[in-house]
Image (spheres, rainbow, N blue to C red):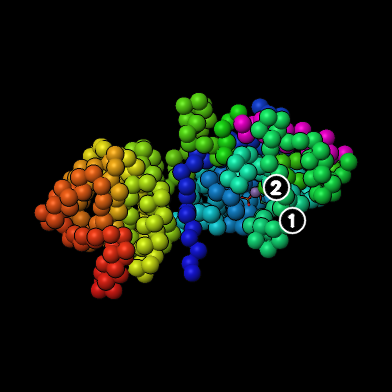
Amino acid sequence: MSVIKIVRISLMNLHEYQSRNLLKDYSIVFPMGDIGESPEEIYNIAKSYDGSVVIKAQIHSGGRGKAGGVKLCNSPEEAKEFAKGILGILGKNIITSQTDSDGVIVEKLLVTELTDIDREFYLSITIDPDFEGAVLIISSEGGMDIEKVAEETPEKIIKLPFDPIIGAKPYELRKIIRSLDLPKEANNEFIKMINNLYLAFLATDSTLIEINPLVLDKKNNLIPLDCKINIDDDSFFRQKSIFELRDKNQENPIETRAKDFDLAYVKLDQGNVGCLVNGAGLAMATMDVTTKSGCFPANFLDVGGSTDKEKIKEAFRILVSDKNVEFLLINLFAGIARADLIAEGVVEAAKETSFDLPIIVSMRGTNSERGFSILKNSDLDIHIAENLGNAAEVLSVLNKRK
Ligand code: GDP
Ligand code: MN
């Protein structure tokens, strides 16, 4: 059974340096550092910190350490070499365990002073559906192998729901401090940090604030070394200054296009079936059915309750621009959306893009009969399925025949 990996979900992502800036307003203090965009700048910044620095690629992805995106340097020359040189990182794409196979481009590097690490913790605040609210997630085993910790020794990860009114309860924080075996000198700083991060989480409409690693240095100072923030897309109307930080160069261009048309697009990293659906639940069912047919979705495009033909046409263009698509599966339960309008949009956009691959259609609801006849009367290679189960059979036959 293959593991489904959703490469990117549409959340407003911030770079590490932007997250650090944002958290400054909440008294979270990171090691000193500056951003550079050229080898010369990197050289000068490193020099201003006496050469002992950490350089980190600024990309919308974690896992940089393991992908060669983080480098501890001992001299400004070494720092410059890391930026440019033969293996220089600036201007290149980095592929991490969290990116797709194209990776993401490195346009900026963060250069910070070096911290002497004694212990690395994992800390994050996120929304947890089980607790129906914000939770603190913390582990004594932070750092680059946190995914492995979560998988193999989940008992080493502590979850604490925030009380919606009072936040983190002091006695619960003290319990966490004991189980992390934090030294006395760091206790107050730890409590202050959690409370400040929670304030930041609420005020910025974050869905995730992650500090990994949060470290203890040799003098028992508690220092956040990395930071990742995601912001709730729906908070756009009141977080305009944060949304101005958006870096489209880090996004998948197709997803950006979809976002601009207010369409929900998800690219999957395998599969050959483009899926046009309306509604997230139907997307899930479509996923099951496609898998049952022996194929796998290449992507999903959720047109929602759209009644705008231009939007449908754009949805079609986006779907078929994916080079992995060999079949298009249209699965609709038209309520507010109209099946005939969607069919018209599909036919027009298919003509425009000279699309000639098989289209399997399962449609129910508003104007579906008219929708079917529009599709049947087109020049397209249409395969009508009576229901979703039947769509799987059609897909399976076509897939074997190809
Ligand atoms: P990520 O791999 O994308 O999460 O990048 P991080 O910024 O978390 O860096 C990865 C790893 O580099 C950390 O887990 C640390 O082990 C190491 N690292 C980062 N900054 C420093 C530092 O100042 N000093 C030392 N000794 N190690 C660091
Ligand atoms: Mn990290």
> Considering the numbered disc 2 on the image, is that residue within a helix, a strand or a loop?
strand
98 left or right of 273? right
Q: How far across and down, in percent of the image, does residue 37 sit? A: 54, 40
- Observer-nearest of 211 and 50: 211
Q: Is mark 1 within 8 Å of ligand 1?
A: no
In the rendered image, the residue lying farthest to the right is 184
Left or right? Give the position of 24 relative to 387.
right
- What amino acid does circle 1 point to? Lys
Is 194 covered by the magenta stretch?
Answer: yes
> At 52% from the left edge and 36% from the top edge, which residue is drawn?
232
For residue 27, above or below residue 363:
above
Looking at the picture, tell me which residue is in the foreground, 298 or 245: 298
Q: Alpha-carbon distance for marks 2 and 1? A: 10 Å
- Residue 94 showing in the rendered view: yes
Find the magenta span and give its range.
Answer: 185-202
Vertical order, 119 against 382 (above or below) = above
Main SS of the magenta part reads helix
Q: Residues within 10 Å of mark 1 (few under 14, many from 20)?
A: some
Q: Residues within 10 Å of mark 2 (few under 14, many from 20)?
A: some
Image quadrant of residue 164?
top right
Q: Does dot 1 land on a helix, a strand or a loop?
A: helix
